[in-house]
Amino acid sequence: MKILSVEQIRQADQYTIQNEPIASVDLMERAATKVFEWLFPRVHKESRIKVFCGMGNNGGDGLVLARLLYQHDVVPEVFMVCYSEKMSPDCEWNYHRLKEETKVPLYGLHVAEDFPEIQKGEVVVDAIFGSGLNRALSGMTAELINYLNHQQAVRIAIDIASGLFADAPSPKGAIFQADYTLTFQRPKLAFLFPENDPYVGNFEVLDIHLHPQFLDEVNVNNFLVDRKMIKSFLHQRTKYSHKGTYGHALLIAGSDGMVGAAVLSSKACLRTGVGLLSVRAPLSTDALATTLPEAMFYRMSEERERECDHGCFSDFEKLDKFTAIGVGPGLGKARATEKALQRLIAEAPVPMVMDADALNILSENKTWMSFLHPKTILTPHPKEFERLFGATSTSFERLELQRLMAMKHNIIIVLKGAHTAVAMPNGAVFFNTTGNPGMATAGSGDVLTGMILSLLAQAYTPEEAAVLGVYLHGLAGDIAMEAMGQEALLASDIINHIGQAYKRLHE
């Protein structure tokens, strides 16, 4: 799903008006009807609903919503926020229509003394400012937003919370704190960043049927991953395939005291469907082989063991038999490991996925990035990203740095988070839509590394492996959460539900 800028949404509106064709006021009716269809099943006739409307088209949406509620026997109160002497034409049309066709109580707000009392549990709808806002709120409108934020009400924003910028960092000051945001056609980029969570809440994308030709042809570089996209990636297994058909992965993971990372990553790799897995793990491999009988393990030479007495990664066998390589989970940062990683980067003939300590070593040796295999996948969390590429002050700034670094180094950067962002060498960024807070647990990243490695080995393109791996990882976590809740979720639970995640995608 393409993520459009505010300007592109405006262009989509105009294109729809001209080419459907449809009058702008009727397009407003369509949009507000979608809001009504979402809200009406969630309230009852006695619900106390207060709709705060601005003087522009966002206010017009609120006025239409109020009229539709009234027509279905739910009587809201409407408060016009009078920050201007003039309404937009479509807002004014719906203002007069509301007055003429209903008995909805209608009030004007000019000063703070006009603010209504709001009871606990009431529904407050923000239709004051839409996505076109380009300045911080001030004066009476800022006072009103701050007042609404302090009420014990259910807060709903139409399209975007008043005061929140869609395409840029929002200024400090008054921003409506929505529990729900009902946005039109496509999500706003701002919805996907952690600093905006208090203002977005749970967002729903309402399809208002903007012209499909415009949506198909408009050029964007930000995308929201959806099920349709993921299903288009999935390979179908054939009747006469065999284990060699699905690749041979090499996983280099673990160190003394960090063997669990190797186990988790290995299990995830196997469960995601790789044909063969070889694991370069630390110290004795007997216990690991018992835990993972499906994998093959190998140890260092005796000479290398003497050189690296903490069970660290210090050498590797020939690489020509592998179809993908994963390195990093629980690896440690011993000097011998650093030297071995440098040689691995120089000699790897196939795509790699790098995580954890492999990234930490890379951040201390940034010149090595020039030697990474094309489309190597890096999977940093925010702190690892900062160590690799530098600090940023906002998520918008970090996104552009992530995009720039992926293009500059011809790599894929998987920046982990609630909406994990996958930046491609061509400048496109894909935001994930699966996963939950229960996955914020030790080992979850090791599982993701194993899953992406498995997909790489199975001949998915690096781009597909990154996006599909992240989505499948989150979906398995969501299914695990359904079974046991968030607090009790372990990384191993994600692995145990990969199969069910695949089944859901194939349904």
Image (cartoon, rainbow, N blue to C red):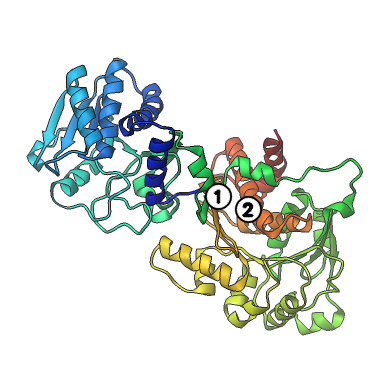
Q: Quadrant of residue 40?
A: top left
Q: Which mark is residue 467?
A: 2
Taking the image as drawn, is residue 277 in sight? yes
Q: Is residue 249 above or below residue 305?
A: above
| Left or right side of 413 for 94 | left
Q: Where does the N terminus fall, quadrant-wise?
A: top right
| Residue 221 disc label | none
* Residue 21 percent location from the top left of the image: 41, 32
Quarter in which the C terminus is drawn: top right
| Residue 383 in view (yes/no) | no
28 or 338, which is in the foreground?
28
Q: Is residue 254 above or below residue 195?
A: below
The answer to which of 260 and 268 lies nearer the viewer is: 268
Residue at the (57%, 73%) spot, across then down: 408
Kind of residue sitting beneath label 2: Val
- Residue in the picture at 35% in, 59% down: 169
Mark 1 = which residue?
Answer: 432
Where on the picture, by quarter, is residue 342?
bottom right
